[in-house]
Image (spheres, rainbow, N blue to C red):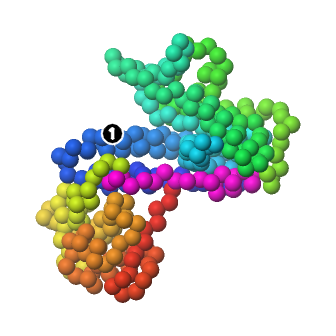
C-alpha cells in the first residue's frame, strides 16, 4: 500500500501565522480570516473521514490526500482524497457543512439553508464529474491503464440534513454522511468487472500521480498585498498570546509572568511562512528582537534546519511540504 499522509496544509499554517502577526485593525484582516476559516473547515472535514479510511484493508488500497495535478489546459485540479485499487479508482469530495443541504434540479444548484439564511455554493456533483473527466485525460496523457472511476460526495458533518429534488441514482447513491463510507466502498468492491489492473500498473498509476502532484503554496503577503514591514516582529507569549516576550537567562519572559524555553520556535517558523524560505542570523535577531548574535545562532541550530554557507553567511532553510 502507498499512502500520501494527510498533513496540516502549509497554506493553513501560513494564514494562521499571518493572522497572528497582522495588526488587528488591518483592512485585509476580515478577508484573510474568512479564507482561513474556509481552509480550516475543509481540512477538519477531510480529517473526519480518516477514521473510516483506516478501517480499509491496508494491502488493497492506495490512498492519496489533497492531490493537485495539471489538466490538459495546464490548470490545476485538486482532489480531496483519491483511492486507487486494482478494480477501480474512487474520488472522494468532502463537504464539511452545517445546515439543510439541498441538491436542486431546475437550476442544478447546491443550496444551504440555515434558519432563514439561504446560500448557493458550487455544485459538488458537477465538480466531481469534471474531476473524472480530467483524471481520465491525465491517465491518457501518461499512457496509464484506466480502470472504472467512481466518485462519492461525503458530508462530514453528521448533523447536516441532505435533501434533493433530483430523484436520480447519482444523488441518492453517491451523496451521503461519512458514517456510510465503509458500506459504500463494500458495494463498489462487489461490482463485477473485467478491467482488473495488475499490481505493476497500480504502482505506476500511483507513482505517476505523486510525481506530478504540486502542493498549493503561494506567497500570502503578495496575495493580500501586504508589505512585510506591516508584520509584527517578536516572540509572542504562548500564555497571554498578545505580549512580546524578552530573552533572559536562557528563557523567554513575559509581562504576564509566564516563562518559556521554546516560545521562539513558533516565531522562527512564522518568519518562514511569511517572509522567506530561509533565515540568516541577522534576520533572526531582527525578527525575534534579540541583541545577541550567539543567542540567535544557538536558537537556529537547535531547530535542526538545513544549513548552507559558513559563519556569518550561513542561511537556515525552511522545508514546508504537504
**Quarter where residue 241 is shown:** bottom left
Check the picture and name the quadrant holding the N terminus. bottom right
Q: Residue at x 34, y 76 (%)?
A: 280
Which residue is at the front of the view, 34 or 50? 34
Vertical placement of residue 305 versus 62, above or below: below
Residue with the mark numbered 1: 34
Vertical placement of residue 229 versus 303, above or below: above
Q: Residue furthest bottom?
A: 311
By secondary structure, the bulk of the magenta-drawn segment is best described as helix
Which residue is at the front of the view, 60 or 290? 290
Residue 17 locus on image (x, y percent): 32, 55
**Quarter where residue 191 is shown:** top right
Q: Would residue 309 be found to the left or right of residue 69 on screen?
A: left
Residue 272 locus on image (x, y percent): 37, 64
Q: Residue at x 17, y 46 (%)?
A: 25
Is residue 86 in view from this perspective?
A: no
State the SS at label 1: helix
Q: Would residue 313 be found to the left or right of residue 100 on screen?
A: left
Asked if the stretch drawn in magenta spans residue 132, the answer is: no
Q: Which residues are magenta?
A: 202-222
Residue 282 locus on image (x, y percent): 28, 77
Q: Residue at x 73, y 31 (%)?
A: 187
Vertical placement of residue 145 versus 98, above or below: below
Vertical placement of residue 277 versus 57, above or below: below
Amino acid at each position: 500500500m502507498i499512502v500520501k499522509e494527510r498533513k496540516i496544509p502549509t497554506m493553513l499554517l501560513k494564514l494562521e501565522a499571518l493572522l497572528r502577526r497582522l495588526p488587528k485593525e488591518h483592512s485585509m484582516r476580515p478577508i484573510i480570516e474568512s479564507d482561513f476559516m474556509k481552509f480550516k473547515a475543509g481540512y477538519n472535514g477531510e480529517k473526519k473521514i480518516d477514521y473510516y479510511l483506516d478501517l480499509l484493508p491496508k494491502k488493497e488500497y492506495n490512498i492519496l490526500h489533497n492531490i493537485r495535478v495539471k489538466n490538459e489546459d495546464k490548470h490545476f485540479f485538486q482532489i480531496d482524497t483519491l483511492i486507487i485499487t486494482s478494480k477501480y479508482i474512487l474520488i472522494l469530495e468532502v463537504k464539511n457543512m452545517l445546515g439543510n443541504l439541498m441538491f436542486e434540479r431546475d437550476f442544478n444548484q447546491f443550496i444551504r439553508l440555515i434558519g432563514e439564511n439561504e446560500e448557493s455554493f458550487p455544485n459538488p456533483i458537477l465538480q466531481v464529474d469534471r474531476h473524472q473527466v480530467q483524471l481520465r485525460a491525465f491517465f491518457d496523457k501518461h499512457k496509464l491503464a484506466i480502470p472504472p472511476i467512481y466518485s462519492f460526495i461525503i458530508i462530514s458533518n453528521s448533523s447536516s440534513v441532505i435533501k434533493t429534488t433530483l430523484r436520480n441514482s447519482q444523488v441518492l447513491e453517491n451523496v451521503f454522511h461519512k458514517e456510510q463510507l465503509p458500506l459504500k466502498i463494500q458495494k463498489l468492491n462487489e461490482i463485477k468487472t473485467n478491467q482488473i489492473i495488475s499490481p505493476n500498473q497500480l504502482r505506476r498509476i500511483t507513482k505517476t500521480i505523486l510525481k506530478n502532484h504540486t502542493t498549493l503554496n503561494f506567497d500570502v503577503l503578495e496575495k493580500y498585498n501586504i508589505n512585510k514591514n506591516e508584520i509584527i516582529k517578536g516572540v509572542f507569549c504562548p500564555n497571554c498570546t498578545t505580549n512580546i516576550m524578552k530573552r533572559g537567562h536562557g528563557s523567554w519572559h513575559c509581562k504576564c509572568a509566564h516563562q518559556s524555553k521554546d516560545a521562539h520556535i513558533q516565531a522562527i517558523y512564522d518568519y518562514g511562512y511569511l517572509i522567506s524560505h530561509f533565515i540568516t542570523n541577522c534576520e533572526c535577531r531582527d525578527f525575534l528582537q534579540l541583541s545577541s548574535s550567539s543567542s540567535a545562532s544557538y536558537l537556529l541550530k537547535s531547530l535542526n534546519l538545513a544549513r548552507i554557507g559558513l559563519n556569518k553567511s550561513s542561511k537556515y532553510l525552511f522545508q514546508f511540504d504537504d
